Each structure stands twice: as C-alpha cells, then as structure tokens.
Amino acid sequence: MTRKIIVTSALPYANAPIHIGHLVEYLQTDIWVRFQKACGNTCYYFCADDTHGTPVMIRARSEGITSEQLIRRMHDRHVSDFAGFGISFDNYYTTHSEENRILSERIYAGAKQAGSIIQKTIQQAYDQQEQMWLPDRYIKGTCPRCKAPDQYGDSCDACGAHYQPTDMINPVSAVSGNPPVLKESVHYFFRLGDYDCLLYTSPSPRDRTRSR
C-alpha cells in the first residue's frame, strides 16, 4: 500500500541568505522525499519564507527599505540558492501571500467563535529608544543561574538553563544596547487543549499479543 505524505522544513526568515545550517536540514529532507517518491509513495515537499517577525523588520530598517522590498529580494535569493544545491520543492512559497492571510484569518475567526482564543495582559521588554517590543532573542544579559555574561533572553549557551527575560541579570536590548523597560501589553492565546487529538502508532508485537 502506498503512503500519502506531506513534508515541510523549518521556514527560513526572509532577512538574510540561506546559510550552511539551513542546507543541512533541507538537503537531508530532500533526500528523504526523493526516497519516498522512488518507493512509489505520494510525497509532497512544501516550504516557504517566514516573512513575519522582528528579524525582517530590523534588517529592512537597517537597509532603509520596506519590509516588502526585502521579502521579495530574499525570496528570489532563497529560491536561487536552493536550486543551486539541487533541492527540489513541490512548492516553495512565502507567508507574505494573500492565500496565507485569508486562511490565517479564517482559522483565527473559527477558533475565536469556538471560544478557543483568550486574551491576557502580560509584561514584556520594550526598547524605548527604538520604540519596539523585544522578543527573547533580542535581549542579552547575564545568566541568572551560572552568571555567564552575554547570553540570550530565553536560554544560556554556557549552562543550558532556560528562563524568562525578566530573570536575567543586567539585561540590555540587542538592538540599541540600552536596558529595556517592562511594559504591559495584551496578547492573544490559542487554547491548544481544546483540540487534543490521539496520535496513533502501530503497537509492538508484544502489545498486539496482549490485546488478543
């Protein structure tokens, strides 16, 4: 019996060219997809540029261009680089598309109508000089556990600890170098538990014997 398989990889940000770390994943995935197709399985390999996020905004601002201009340029560059390494997608697209906007809004509206979207007010780091909210990776400081300096706002490369940016010692913005302030903002959360599903795995021979 042939299988029907949909495959994707981690979406690269549209803020810079593809690097060797990307290629390790995409080459391995491409090999696996080719193997599945050679076995007669129906296998589609989809991927896209991730165009939404702070890295894209900061890169566009540093070049003095719009995010849309950067997104278009990087998409062409990514497609060219992947093709140069023989990586074959059934479709390589972009999250900055009308289709993605429509489908995302449809999913959000359905989840909200079902009561699966909730609002919470949280505290978040804010760079007053740059007038922007700071994601975890855009905050650096001293690890609260091992005291290693120059670590990211969510984890320490020295000891492997995971923490909140508010736990860091002497945090600074990775954008301006200034200490961030804490400000309250309203965030929307998806109640994933409303959509619990069972993952089926084939039982082992011992389990099959026991179930009889």
Image (cartoon, rainbow, N blue to C red):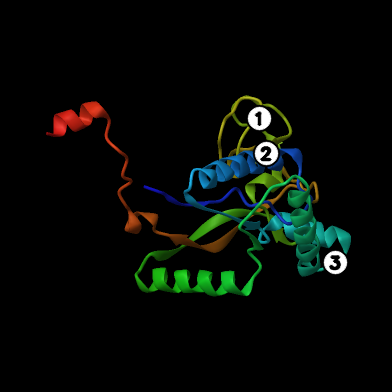
Left or right: 139 as drawn, with respect to 99: right
Disc 3, SS: loop
Left or right: 7 as drawn, with respect to 61: left
Name the mark nearer the viewer: 3 or 2. Answer: 3
How far apart are the alpha carbons under marks 3 and 1?
Answer: 33 Å
Depicted 177 relative to depicted 108: above or below:
above
Depicted 62 relative to depicted 149: above or below:
below
**Measured from the top left, where is residue 84 in percent x and y?**
78, 48
The label on residue 9 is none
Question: Residue at label 1?
Answer: 157
Q: Amino acid at mark 3?
A: Ile
Residue 66's image quarter? bottom right
Question: Residue at label 3?
Answer: 65
Quarter of the picture holding the C terminus: top left
Disc 1, SS: loop
Does the image show residue 130?
no
How far apart are the alpha carbons under marks 3 and 2?
Answer: 28 Å
Q: Amino acid at mark 2?
A: Tyr
How far apart are the alpha carbons under marks 2 and 1?
Answer: 8 Å
Question: Residue at label 2?
Answer: 152
User: What residue is rendered at 66% in x and 25% in y?
Assistant: 158
Q: Amino acid at mark 1?
A: Asp
Pointers 3 and 1 in contact (C-beta within 8 Å): no
Does the image show residue 205?
yes
**Measured from the top left, where is residue 48 in percent x and y?**
64, 58
Pointers 2 and 1 in contact (C-beta within 8 Å): yes
